[in-house]
Amino acid sequence: MSLANKLAEERRARLAAERLLEQKQAELHAANRKLGLHARALSHEITETRAEVQTVRNENQRVKSDLSVAHEKIEIAERRLWHSIQTIEDGFAFFDADSRMIAANDAWLAVFDGVEAVRPGASYIEILQVITEEGIVNIGDMSPHAWRERMLDRWQGSAPEPEVIRLWNGHYIRLTDRRGAGGDMVSLVQNITATIRYEKELKEARRRAEAANRAKSAFLANMSHEIRTPMNGVVGMADLLMEGTLDDEQQLYVNTIKHSAEALLVIINDVLDYSRIEADRLVLHPEPFDLERCIHELVTLMQAHARDLGIDLLVDYDLFLPTRFIGDPGRIRQILTNLVGNAVKFTEAGHVMIRVTGMQASEGAEADIRVTIEDTGTGIPPDKLDHIFGEFNQADDAQSRKFEGSGLGLAISRKLVRLMGGDLWVESEQGRGSTFGLSLSLPSVEAGMPEDAHPDPALTRALVVEPHDTCRALLERQLGALGMRVTTCADARAALDLVAVDTPDLVICDHHIPGMDGFELATALRAGGYAMHIIVLSTNSGSAAQDPAYGDVQAVLQKPVARRDLITALAALSAPDPVIASAGDGFGMDRAPVTPRAMRVLAAEDNKTNRLVFSKMVQTLDIDLTFAENGREAVALFQSAVPDIVFMDISMPEMDGKDATRAIRMIEANTGGHVPIVAMTAHAMSGDDADIFAAGLDHYLPKPLKRAAIVEHIIAAADPALRPPEGTAAQEAG
């Protein structure tokens, strides 16, 4: 190798070494720089860690300080709580889940008379053992073991019932124990000795009060008996004397004796009732009763006295209100007697109107009934309206000398009404009369409503002859509700003129009308050849029945006439042809051919709404529809109405449809014949029809009913001799 090459090679080697040195120096510099940065970061981290450590130390110190303060507060709260527990008079103790006492206040420990074994740490069973052995509790006839077992069973229950224990010293304590979620038990002991003694004193006071009330009631009952016994002789003898022959002065004496005795008996009754009410011993006896009938019976009793005074007694009973309710009929009659009696007593001329209105929300619900007694009497001054309901008060105390009475009637009536949950009020204008109002809510009884009786459809025109405007309006409304066209007049002459122009099917006239009385009018109509039905209304129907012209009328009804009586009387009539009779024949012989009767349909249905639905379904048919509201009534109507077909509800009160059908089939077995009976029932399960057919029913209609099915059964049962049920009315409707 040449020197130049060697020099060149050495130069290259040197350059390489220099480059390597520079590289290593750069790497060393970078490593130093990285090491410096790491050292700087590590130093910074150490600085931050030191700061954090210091912060933690500071926080720890603060927490320790707060914890110390919290501990102090807890200790203070515990001391205060325990001091409060110690302060209360009731005993307070804590038990853990193992039934060992944790703590108890002095009041709780004091119950055990300082027995050392009863202390924190003692178990509940140990406490029971100690107190029975030491005789701290009075366990009566129980053995200690049995008593401890009973108390332990109570303790272990999830919610122990409070227990009253009698101690050896005669004191009574109530134990009330409550178990917590973790099984701990809190026990509270209350000394109820004072309460027990107070209850005993109250019982003793009540016993003495009841004894006093019994003594008072016995005294009043004895006095009532002792007074009534001789008064019975007084009244009885007075009645006997009045039946004898007396001159005017003697008659006056006897009347005075009788009226004074009766007034005294009324006062006795008032005092007894008031005494019972004040002693809360008056008990109501609710039962089904007919309110309208009750009112009319009352009016009948008072009618003679009112007639003597020249006062008309009128009744306006809501046509759409049921008549049968559940209540105490005796007390309701007593209230109405007081109110109507007062109205008659303080009315010198005019009338007394008993008006009954009400509303029934639905079948079986209570009906809100409002009874008002309106009179045209003396009226009551405004400042006396509240005064009259006080004891022994009348509107004018000076009138108590004029009008007999104890002054208790209205007070008793208001108390009785409020005892029934109702109210009694009065509205009056002095000199123009008064209105006493009575409101009650009574359950209705859906049975025997007057609407179930239907007058003959041929009775379409009626003439009412009544001199009293109010009575005339009432009759017009009642007859109009039955579908009649009603004409009214006030006297006999006008009645004869109206009959001559338009002959009615029915004449209803008052017994006493201007010009001639009701019977004379009837005789005049018969003499004129008129054959309509005639009904006379009389305030004394017994006397009216003795009139020689009684044979010229079809019925004599007591006035004011009850709705049921009027409808029953009309239903008993068979409508004659209103033609003028032949000379000498008061009822006429020239009659039109007898028209076939309508088909009679009996429907037994206890639900008022369902009855309405059924009637609407068949309203276009030419039939005579009668409703029964239970099975027993259906059997009775089957015998009286003699229906051509029966629609029988299965589920009904008193007697269901199957039992009613069996009863009807037994009747038919004795009398012959077979009336088709169609079941109407909501029982539509499989097998129900077989059970129904087995009872004797012929057909089965499940509810809801279909009009077409009902009509089909009616047409199928129609006798050719009867008017076709699907006649003109149905054709026109279709």
Image (tube, rainbow, N blue to C red):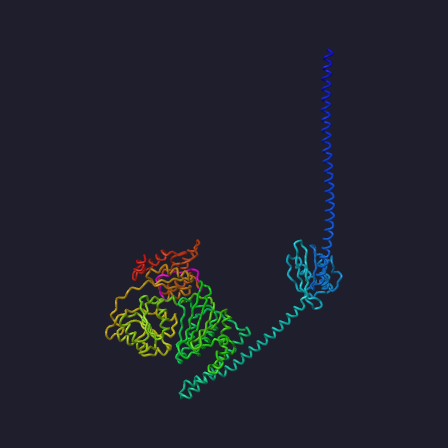
Residue 182 vertical placement versus 486 (above, below): above
Outermost residue, top side: 2
Assign the C terminus to one quadrant of the image.
Answer: bottom left
Q: Position of residue 391 (x, y in %)?
A: 52, 77
Q: Nearer the viewer, residue 41 or 237?
A: 41
In the image, 498 versus 250, the foreground residue is 498
x then y, percent, for residue 63 = 72, 49
Instruction: Give the x, y percent position of residue 8.
Output: 72, 15
Q: Is residue 645 magenta?
A: yes
Frontmost residue, 229 versus 96? 96
Q: Is residue 444 left or right of residue 41?
A: left
- Using the rendered view, name the quadrant where residue 452 is placed: bottom left
Q: Quadrant of residue 570?
A: bottom left
Question: Which region of the structure is painted magenta?
Answer: 640-654
Q: Is residue 145 left or right of residue 702?
A: right
- Magenta span has 95? no
- Determine the residue located farthest toward the right in the rendered image: 116
Residue 167 at least partly seen: yes
Query: Could you tell whether 67 is left or right of 457 in the image?
Result: right
Question: Which residue is more in the foreground, 329 or 643?
Answer: 329
Estimate the x, y position of residue 132 in percent, counting from the top left: 72, 63
Assign the N terminus to one quadrant of the image.
top right
